[in-house]
Image (cartoon, grey):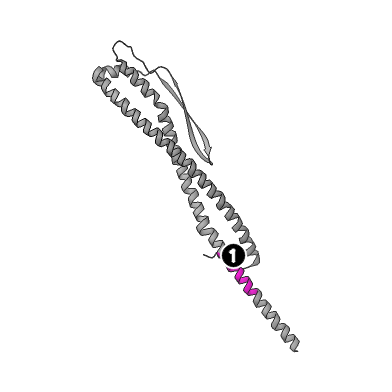
Amino acid sequence: MKLNVNSTRMELMRLKKRLIVAQRGHKLLKDKQDELMRQFMEIIEETRTIRAKIEKDLSFILKRFIHINSFMGSERVYEALVLPSVNIDLSVRVISIMNVKVPEITFKQEGSVRCYGYAETSGELDLYLIDLGRIFGDMIRLAQNEKRAELLADELVKTRRRVNALEYVLIPNIKETVRYITIKLDEMERSNLSRLMKVKDIVRAK
């Protein structure tokens, strides 16, 4: 669709400069979109792997806990675990991926997961807590990656809209307007030339 501008040489020069800027911006945004997609797919692949591992480990840990609960009794299990002795310190800092601010989560664990006496507990409970503590890091990474994927997906949608707006709306409209003004100016030039020739012929005839 032609832009609503005056058909002048100054406007033509301004539109040609605007077209160059729009095409350069389109290329930069397209490159950004491609890199965002690459980063997004890497995170998605890693997240899928971590999630599959966590689901497998949690299934095994849950079965072990059910076995412990039936063997020791729920009251003894509760008494053994009612006073936690592990402190977990989470820290979140913001990093940038393609100018998108995403979280980086780190954690520090202090204390022992075994916070009970050994006389009235099963060795299975020790193994259960060790396995549960082992997958905590994977769960943190999963949460981190899922948030990163969400933020990158939002930015990818915004970038794709900008690319499409430049590629299918603004750049074609500027090109059409440049073509229209060029044709209009050529017609005006031919008309002026024709008028000058007629004036010249009239002067000669006199």
State the residue at coordinates (63%, 67%).
8
- Looking at the picture, tell me which residue is in the foreground, 49 or 184: 49
On screen, residue 92 above or below 80: below
**14 left or right, relative to 103:** right
Identify residue for label 1.
178
Give the percent coordinates (x, y) of residue 137. 42, 27
Total residue callouts? 1
Dominant SS type (magenta): helix
Kind of element beneath mark 1: helix
Is 132 within the magenta?
Answer: no
- Looking at the picture, tell me which residue is in the foreground, 66 or 48: 48
- Quarter of the image with the C terminus in it: bottom right
* Kind of residue indicated by mark 1: Val
On screen, residue 59 above or below 4: above
On screen, residue 32 above or below 13: above
Report the residue that reaches farthest toward the bottom: 206
Magenta-tinted stretch: 176-188
State the residue at coordinates (31%, 26%).
60
